[in-house]
Image (cartoon, rainbow, N blue to C red):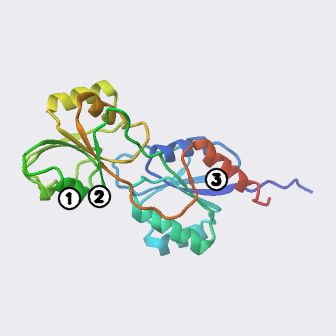
């Protein structure tokens, strides 16, 4: 009689973040897991993992539900951006529909410290309105999707940093586009903001270390930070460290029958 072979845990990682990449790297080559990384496809030339991957949407909750069933996914990990509200909501709904264990792997949110000049806002629109009528030099590091909110404040001079070019280009009369991918160093951020004469930094509370240097640079230069808070999320089991996610997966791997 041939010895039984333990089945691999089928893991779907909804990615696009450094957390997703780190998890994919740790699962690669681990015989206990058959992991798939799913990327939305919004970033050109994404960093691809050494595990199976797919690019593109699922087609809403119904499409993700069908994928979980047809691909026999055992565990779903939502490691998307903290501001990716739609896919996180879809993941929660699909997990409930299929009974698939779900966990969120996210970055710890930033908090202001001594010397920081933060103003916190619920969304980009309220941040744009609060810059004021007097023209200011504003550094936008909020990604491409929320740039439209600042069309309502065209009097300002914007420095916009994104990974990929906005499509369509922002309808702003005064802006400079800087295409760059983090991580960014403190000295470079200080130099950039000083040379551009930045007066206000507008960013989203994405957390993590890859882009934190801009906050340290703003503190060093006395620049005001308009911080857009994270959207209210669904009540889902959440982890902020890689080790915690790996322990979660290990517990579920023991439940897979050979």
**The quadrant where residue 96 appears:** bottom right
Depth check: give the residue in front, 254 or 197.
Answer: 197
**In the image, residue 187 lies at what x, y percent?**
30, 24
Q: Secondary structure at mark 3?
A: strand
Q: Which residue was labeled with disc 1? A: 149
Q: Which mark is residue 58?
A: none
In the image, residue 49 sits, relative to residue 90, either above or below, namely above
Q: Crowdedness of circle 1 by 10 Å Cα count: few (<14), some, many (20+)?
A: some
Q: Residues within 10 Å of mark 3 (few under 14, many from 20)?
A: some
Residue 50 percent location from the top left of the image: 54, 43
- Residue 210 coordinates in the image, percent (x, y): 40, 37
Q: Nearer the viewer, mark 3 or mark 1?
A: 1
Q: Compared with residue 97, is residue 149 higher up or lower down, i.e. above or below?
A: above
Q: Nearer the viewer, mark 1 or mark 2?
A: 2
Q: In this view, which residue lies farthest toward the top?
A: 187
Residue 235 falls left or right of residue 178: right
Q: Nearer the viewer, mark 3 or mark 2?
A: 2
Task: Say if 168 sits above or below 178 in the image.
Answer: below
């Amino acid at each position: 009689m041939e010895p039984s072979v333990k089945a691999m845990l089928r893991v779907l990682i909804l990615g696009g973040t450094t957390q997703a990449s780190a998890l994919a790297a740790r699962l690669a080559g681990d015989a206990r897991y058959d992991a798939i990384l799913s990327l939305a496809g919004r970033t050109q030339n994404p960093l691809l993992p050494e595990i199976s991957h797919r690019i593109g949407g699922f087609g809403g909750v119904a499409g993700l539900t069908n994928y979980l069933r047809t691909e026999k996914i055992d565990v779903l990990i939502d490691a998307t951006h903290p501001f990716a509200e739609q896919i996180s909501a879809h993941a929660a709904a699909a997990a409930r529909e299929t009974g698939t264990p779900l966990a969120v792997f996210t970055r710890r949110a930033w908090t202001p410290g001594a010397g920081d000049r933060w103003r916190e806002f619920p969304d980009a629109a309220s941040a744009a309105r609060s810059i004021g009528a007097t023209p200011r030099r504003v550094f936008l590091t909020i990604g491409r999707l929320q740039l439209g909110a600042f069309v309502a404040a065209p009097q300002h001079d914007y420095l916009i940093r994104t990974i990929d070019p906005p499509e369509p280009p922002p309808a702003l009369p005064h802006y400079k586009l800087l295409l760059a991918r983090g991580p960014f160093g403190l000295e470079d951020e200080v130099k950039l903001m000083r040379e551009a004469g930045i007066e206000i930094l507008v960013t989203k509370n994405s957390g993590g270390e890859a882009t934190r240097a801009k906050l340290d640079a703003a503190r060093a230069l006395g620049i005001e930070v308009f911080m857009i808070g994270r959207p209210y999320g669904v009540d889902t089991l959440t982890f902020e460290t890689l080790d915690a996610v790996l322990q979660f997966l290990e517990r579920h791997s023991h439940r897979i029958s050979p």
